[in-house]
Image (cartoon, helix red, strand yellow):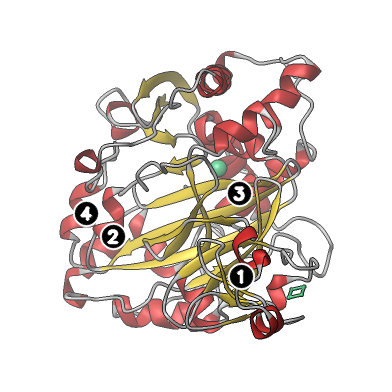
Amino acid sequence: MLSEEKNRALTQVGADTPGGELLRRYWHPIGAVDQLASDPVRPVRLLGEDLVLYRDLGGNYGLLARHCSHRNADLAYGFVEERGLRCNYHGWQFDHEGKGVHFPYEDMVDADSKLRNKIRHTAYPVRAKGGLLWAYLGPQPAPELPDWEPFSWNNGFVQIVFADVPCNWVQAQENSIDPVHFEWMHANWSRRLRGDTGPYAPAHTKLHFEEFDFGFVYKRVREDTDESHPLWTVGRVCLWPHGFFLGDHFEWRVPVDDENTLSVTWSFIRVPNEAEPYRQETIPSWQSPIVDAKTGRWICSHVINQDIVAWVGQGRITNRSHENLGASDRGVALIRRRLFEDMDRVARGQDPKGVIRDPALNRRIELPMSERELMLNGMPLEQYERHPVWGKHLHHFPFHAGQPDHIKRAYEDAMGLKTVEVGIVNI
Ligand code: FES
Ligand SMILES: [Fe+2]
């Protein structure tokens, strides 16, 4: 339980708030490389700021404040040049550092105009990694953009899925350190959703939470596992400050503003040995719907859609003064405490948790996972098919509803198989 005041402090993302200052010490995935290949100018909103993300004809990525420094026209309708983005109203052109490159009429009548030197349009750095475009809105020097090991895995089909989620990012991230929800929200609810009125899934019997450099790890024992199982010996990663890593995929809960979150899923599916070598030319991205167009209700057929039902169900900014934390919520309490401590560190001028400054330490960073052997070496298709988890993943994308047909076909081609719908996958 948190007071209303503490809850506000925890959830605010604006530039002049402690939470917003903290979030401005990290890189945020805000788009995909393939999005800009097809449409080079995209409006985005991040940490309460309206921005335009673009790729110019010279191949530079840029992220500019959305409204033109001249008279506030919408740069989302601008067009790219060899260097930078040009406003469609009077042609002012800014580069990826916010410098004015061309002020057509001003340059015509007075090439030494003071205006030229005075104007510095708000601009933020953007980098590409893992098929994602990452933005940093904080003070310079920017920290390293984390080079997580999976970004350099080979022989896999990667896809990126976005979903616009109308609630604050913290309640989404609290789901990253919430082991018991797997039992109820995914296993048991999925059983009931498919009409199975039989017994419930094995219950959790023991939980443990640990902190490490890049987040927290939660460990669990269920009725059907023991302390030799990877769920206990390795666990799962609540990645700092707004990620979740489960061995085969990352999820990020990117704060759009106080009441909206961009859910970003980066999924790697290892091809069977028979399909090697496989080289993916471009990483595709797609947008997952979260509302069922027929019923107007939240979609609940896929794993992350189910999670989203929980997040939005808690309210736009959940009221933590009304909650009652129990023994299963120890991890939730831990990350809240660390977020508040991090806000204090930033206020003291220090780096918060997980910020990487040394490039030598930022090489293929390994995170705790039990699937490394499979991800690196794969397995024959026949073994894949028999596997209790991967066998299902082979034929069905379990995380998000709405996978476009052309991505499904590209996946089938990569894997050397035909996919079939198997309904809700019980993880
Ligand atoms: S408003 Fe953009 S050039 Fe005039
Ligand atoms: Fe979940």
Residue 124 locus on image (x, y percent):
53, 55
Q: Residue at x 56, y 37 (%)?
A: 23
Between discs 1 and 4, the one toward the N terminus? 4
| Marker disc for residue 386 | 2
Q: For the residue carrying disc 4, how many other residues have a C-alpha within 10 Å: few (<14), some (14-19), or many (20+)?
A: some
Q: Nearer the viewer, residue 389 or 33?
A: 33
Q: Nearer the viewer, residue 386 or 371?
A: 371
* Amino acid type for the residue under numbered disc 4: Leu
- Residue 351's place in the image compared with 157, above or below, is above
- Residue 182's place in the image compared with 283, above or below, is above
* Amino acid type for the residue under numbered disc 2: Arg
Residue 375 image-quadrant placement: bottom left
Q: Which residue is mark 1?
A: 402
Disc 2 to disc 4, how far (Cα)? 14 Å
Element assignment for label 4: helix
Q: Is residue 393 left or right of residue 68?
A: left
Q: Which residue is mark 3?
A: 190
* Amino acid type for the residue under numbered disc 3: Ser
Element assignment for label 3: helix
> Which is in the foreground here, disc 3 or disc 1?
1
Element assignment for label 2: helix
Q: Are the residues flagged by discs 2 and 3 in contact, CB closer than 8 Å? A: no
Question: Can residue 414 be seen from the camera position used here?
Answer: yes
Between discs 2 and 4, the one toward the N terminus? 4
Between discs 3 and 1, the one toward the N terminus? 3
Q: Residue at x 57, y 45 (%)?
A: 253
